[in-house]
Image: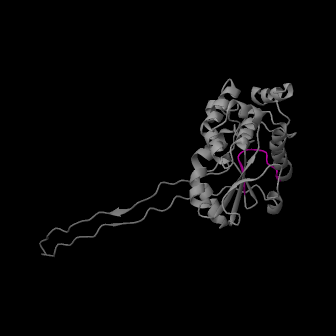
Amino acid sequence: MSASAMNLSKRLLSGVAIATVALVLGACSDDKKEQASATPTETTETAAKTDAKPADAMTTASTTAAATTEAKPAATEVAQSTAAPAAKVELPSSEGSVDTAKLMEPGALPEMAIGEANAPVTIVEYMSMTCPHCAAFHNNTFEEIKTKYVDSGKVRFVLREFPFDPRAAAAFMLARCAPEGQYFPMISMLFKQQQQWAAAQNGRDALLQMSKLAGFTQESFESCLTNQKLLDDVNAVMQKGAKDFGVQSTPTFFVNGEHYSGDMSVDVMSALIDSKL
C-alpha cells in the first residue's frame, strides 16, 4: 500500500477533518443543543411530533333487572362497547419544497434505492452514519415503513450520504464497497451497532470488526478506505445536498419534494405518506 493511501485511511478513522462542504454543520440538527453520544458535536431536532392521547373505551356492563313488587319480567341489557378513537397524529411541518426532477437527477454515486420506480411516493433521506437520530429512525421506523409501503409498491425509498465526520464517511465508503445488493443490509448493521464503532476509541479496529461480519477481509477493508475517488464522491453527494437542496441537518427527508427534518416515528411517517397517496 502506498504512503498516500495509508495516510488517507488514517485520516478517515483518526478524527482528523476531511474535506467537506464549506458549511458549519456541527449537528444532526441545528435547534436543540443536546449532546449526541456517538458524535459529541452533533445535536438534534425532532420535527415530527405525535399528539398521542389515551384511547377512550366506553363499555356498558351487562345488568339484570331484579324482580320487583310490580312483577315486571327480568330484563338483561346487552353489553355494548364503543371502539376506541384513533390517537391523533400531528403531521410534521414542511420546511419548503424542491424541484423533484432536479432532486432525482443522477449524482456522483449510483442511487441506492428500494421500491418501485413508479411508486406514487418517493422519499429521499440524507443521513449521517454517526448521527444517533438517523440510527433511531433506521432501527425503530425504517423496517416497518419498508414492509408497509415499499414492499406494497406505494413508496420508493432513496438513501443518500451526508457524513458529518470522518468515521461517518468511512462507514459510507464501506457500505458502498459491500457486495452487490448488500448496501442496505450493511447500513442497517452499522446503525444497529453504532455505539460499538462510532464512539470507540479505536474507530479503525471497531469498523474492521463490523466489516468482517459483512464479509470484508483486511485487504478489502484497506482497499476500500484508501479509495480517494470514492471518498470524493461521497463528499460530492453531501455537497450537492447542502448546496442544491438546503440540507443542513440529519436526518432530512424529501417526500415527493417536500422538505422535512428530524427523526420520525412509524405513526408520523405513515400519516405523512398517507397524506401524499
Q: Is residue 33 left or right of residue 229?
A: left
Residue span colored magenta = 245-254
State the image coordinates of residue 233 (x, y, percent, origin top left). Answer: 83, 44
Number of numbered discs present? 0
- Indicate yes or no whether the magenta region holds residue 68: no
Q: Nearer the viewer, residue 131 or 229?
A: 229
Task: Residue 166: tell me if it is visible.
Answer: yes
Q: Is residue 64 left or right of residue 36?
A: left
Which residue in the rendered view is the most extreme toward the right?
Answer: 22
Q: Nearer the viewer, residue 83 or 66?
A: 83
Q: Is residue 190 left or right of residue 6?
A: left
Q: Nearer the viewer, residue 202 or 93?
A: 202
Q: Nearer the viewer, residue 3 or 38?
A: 3
The type of colouring in the image is one colour
Which residue is located at x 62 percent, y 44 percent? 188
Which residue is located at x 54 percent, y 53 percent? 52
**Quick one: quadrant of the C terminus?**
bottom right
State the image coordinates of residue 126 (x, y, percent, origin top left). Answer: 74, 48
Which residue is located at x 63 percent, y 34 percent? 212
Instruction: Name the magenta segment's main secondary structure.
Output: loop
Quarter occupied by residue 208: top right
State the image coordinates of residue 198 (x, y, percent, origin top left). Answer: 67, 32
Task: Residue 28: tell me if it is visible.
Answer: no
Q: Is residue 232 left or right of residue 74?
A: right
- Indicate yes or no whether the magenta region holds residue 248: yes
Establish if 154 lies above or below 45: below
State the image coordinates of residue 209 (x, y, percent, origin top left). Answer: 63, 30
Establish if 111 lies above or below 275: above
Which residue is located at x 76 percent, y 40 percent? 163
Quarter occupied by residue 124: bottom right
**Quick one: quadrant of the N terminus?**
top right
